[in-house]
Image (cartoon, coloured by chain):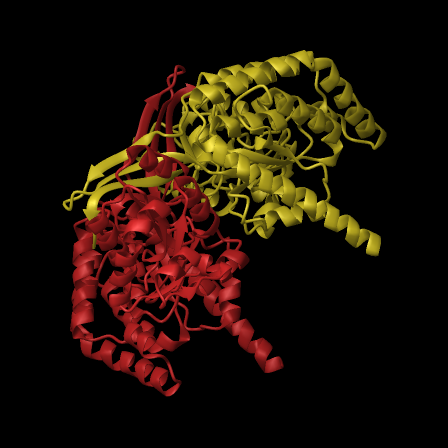
Chain colours: A red, B yellow
Amino acid sequence: MTELLQEQQTEKSELLQKAIQAKQASAVLAKSTTKQKNNALRTISTHLLEEQAYILEENSKDVEAGRQNGMSESLVDRLQLDPLRLKDMADALIQLTKLADPVGEVLEKWERPNGLTMSKIRVPLGVVGMIYEARPNVTVDASSLCLKTGNAVVLRGSSTAIHSNKAIVSVIRGALEKTDLPVESVQLLEDTSREAASHMFKLNQYLDVLIPRGGAKLIQTVVQNSTVPVLETGAGNCHIYIDETADLKMAIAIALNAKTQRPSVCNSCESILVHKAWAEKHLPQLLAALQEQQVKIHGDQEVQKLSPNVIPAVEGDWGTEYLGLEVALKTVDGIGEAIDHINTYGTKHSEAIISSNSENVDQFFMEIDAAAVYHNASTRFTDGFEFGFGAEIGISTQKLHARGPMGLPALTSTKYIVRGNGQIK
Amino acid sequence: MTELLQEQQTEKSELLQKAIQAKQASAVLAKSTTKQKNNALRTISTHLLEEQAYILEENSKDVEAGRQNGMSESLVDRLQLDPLRLKDMADALIQLTKLADPVGEVLEKWERPNGLTMSKIRVPLGVVGMIYEARPNVTVDASSLCLKTGNAVVLRGSSTAIHSNKAIVSVIRGALEKTDLPVESVQLLEDTSREAASHMFKLNQYLDVLIPRGGAKLIQTVVQNSTVPVLETGAGNCHIYIDETADLKMAIAIALNAKTQRPSVCNSCESILVHKAWAEKHLPQLLAALQEQQVKIHGDQEVQKLSPNVIPAVEGDWGTEYLGLEVALKTVDGIGEAIDHINTYGTKHSEAIISSNSENVDQFFMEIDAAAVYHNASTRFTDGFEFGFGAEIGISTQKLHARGPMGLPALTSTKYIVRGNGQIK
């Protein structure tokens, strides 16, 4: 017991010490120039490639341990690095140098009748806390996005990726030593216990924001327990609504794409709603197309009538994120029922209507409460790169600060600069 | 015990029931036109004046109870309404109709190489929870700002203002009945227990944001306990730094104004930092000017040498919000020490430098971490009206979503609208 307590004390000190170092580094980062930051990103890119053998060796320890502990192959796939993946990570750093630096941007400028001149400029957030699962690429990704936006970062990855993360962070810090940016800008918690994470949730004095990246459970744990402001990302129970006037070929192509192109991601489709009049004519074709792609269908009674291979849908299906080749399929009486259903069961992520009726499209755009609403396009486009942001920190499903795909500006705050010549109130 | 549990059940039901009603109303509000919303604000304004006698009578019950329970005169003053104050509230509603409606504003619009057209538009947040102290004017203020921005509101005021709040909300709802907006848009919790507030902190399903308005303790309770995203407002430990080259008259005028013009508010000055070279020449004049206004001075050793009436400052003084005629006064070696001190003890609210050295001003603007930084002007200007926003929900001291004085746009979120013609990924 005493040993446990002592251990917890040490754990606490590691977090506190690193958070304080990050806070101090953030003050230097905030005044670094775009040139200094881009130079650092290029240096890190070079070092990642140069230290490839070391990183891959350390990564193989995690992979081996994962396999021994019965980690699923899909998780091993996310964990495992190879020369190509490292090359992609190094390239992404170079791409990042080409994006505009949001810090210092003047968002508004105006003068008051009393002669005060006001401007609102973008500034870094300060220190970003990242809590994520066993994906070592997030270590590079989060560090580089934070550096580009002048933020220090405290990384808390999974214990199952600890060798990889330690190796990558030591390479990043080795690179930073050769630049004008403080080495202390990037901090990795080696203690991956729950206790350390819980302490991180309450570190308002040093952390300006927490960003969880991973499954719904991880994200909810952070949202439910953190007093540090959270940028919530993730969960997507996305719908495709096929309206009465939907073009047959387009509707099937979009539904298939949204469901099957990459079923494990948050912007893939989990429920298809079909207008009854469209269903009467075309539902068999839609079902055949889905079933040809091995998609299991959980259908309502109307759907069941049309196919023997349909699993009867239960209430729980409307709110399920299958994240695989399964879909819930429901017929609706019209746009009103579709909107009600989506606003009831959706996660406010991405929602699409396939329709040739512009009034219905307008109603869908107005009444659906979601980060992104689509007409005649796949929900799979909700992504910082597809939106043209050049980088993505995640897809926000909250309404404050940032909503939808988050590019670099989501990692900034603002500051009002007021110039006077003696004004008093 | 059983009775208590039953009572809690009832309390819970009141909150849940009203939150659900607010959520339903928010869907109607989100599609209300600017004309409908302004019409509602005008109707409420008229009703507040027509029902003046009723509101004042109910208010007098709170005032009487407050006095009987030993409420301080300054709190009674905040609680008490009179015909003039009601007239001001009614006028503010009319002013609000003249401000631009942020909802529907197109913030960005662009096209992607694949032909998708994207736009980012402002939308209401949904349901706003307000938790505030015994100021009935906040009841009108919060309701009207929320209605203007298409949000429903759940109000949780103080038990000491419950008669006033019930009267005001019944008048507002009576007015709404005559308009196109749902009566359920404005909800008042009659249960003012801590339990009901605690339950409100966790109502993520129905509340999109919580805004606490009141003292530091109330705000911290909400920040520390809420899983609903919070817009943190309030605490201000603001500094005036008088640099070596500061103009004598200007420095004294600004320091006096920032300290004494309204000492009880968050943007008033709590600490004055003085460059040693300036202090050597001018400190006695600054001390005399402050003491003439009955300001108690907590000074460091240098300051103590110059005046027998200075209270020796202790470490705690640098972080104290006096909110009265008291100030901490410290001499510093230069701009670096001033910045370090402010970033250590400040609350990131409003900070001013008085200087004729433009390099120092630039350094102050760059390195001070605060919502608003001033050159040669009083910190008292940090206020939505002084900034020209026409309305203010509060002054945010957090970095996410909104920072500094918050106008109507702070009560909105955004939504991406994507139009395609069959695009798939």
Left or right: residue B411 versus residue A142 is: right
**x, y (%) of residue B259?**
56, 27
User: Most extreme residue toward the right, as rendered?
Assistant: B68
**Quadrant of residue B207 within the rendered picture:** top right
Judging depth in this view, the residue of B97 and A252 nearest the camera is A252
Left or right: residue B335 versus residue B197 is: left
**Do we see residue B272 in this rendering?**
no
Query: What is the total number of numbered labels drawn onto the structure image?
Result: 0
Judging depth in this view, the residue of A316 and A130 nearest the camera is A316
**Do we see residue A108 in this rendering?**
yes
**x, y (%) of residue A2?**
62, 80
**x, y (%) of residue B88?**
60, 15
**x, y (%) of residue A7?**
54, 77
Q: Is residue B164 above or below residue B48?
A: below
Q: Is residue B60 above or below residue A378?
A: above
Judging depth in this view, the residue of A222 and B307 nearest the camera is A222
- Image quadrant holding the C terminus of chain B, namely bottom left
Left or right: residue B261 versus residue A54 is: right
**Quadrant of residue A147 within the rendered picture:** bottom left
User: Most extreme residue toward the left, as rendered?
Assistant: B113
Q: Is residue B337 above or below residue B85?
A: below
Give the residue at x 24% y 35%. B109
- Image quadrant holding the N terminus of chain B, namely bottom right
Give the residue at x 56% y 43%. B318
Give the residue at x 31% y 47%. A278
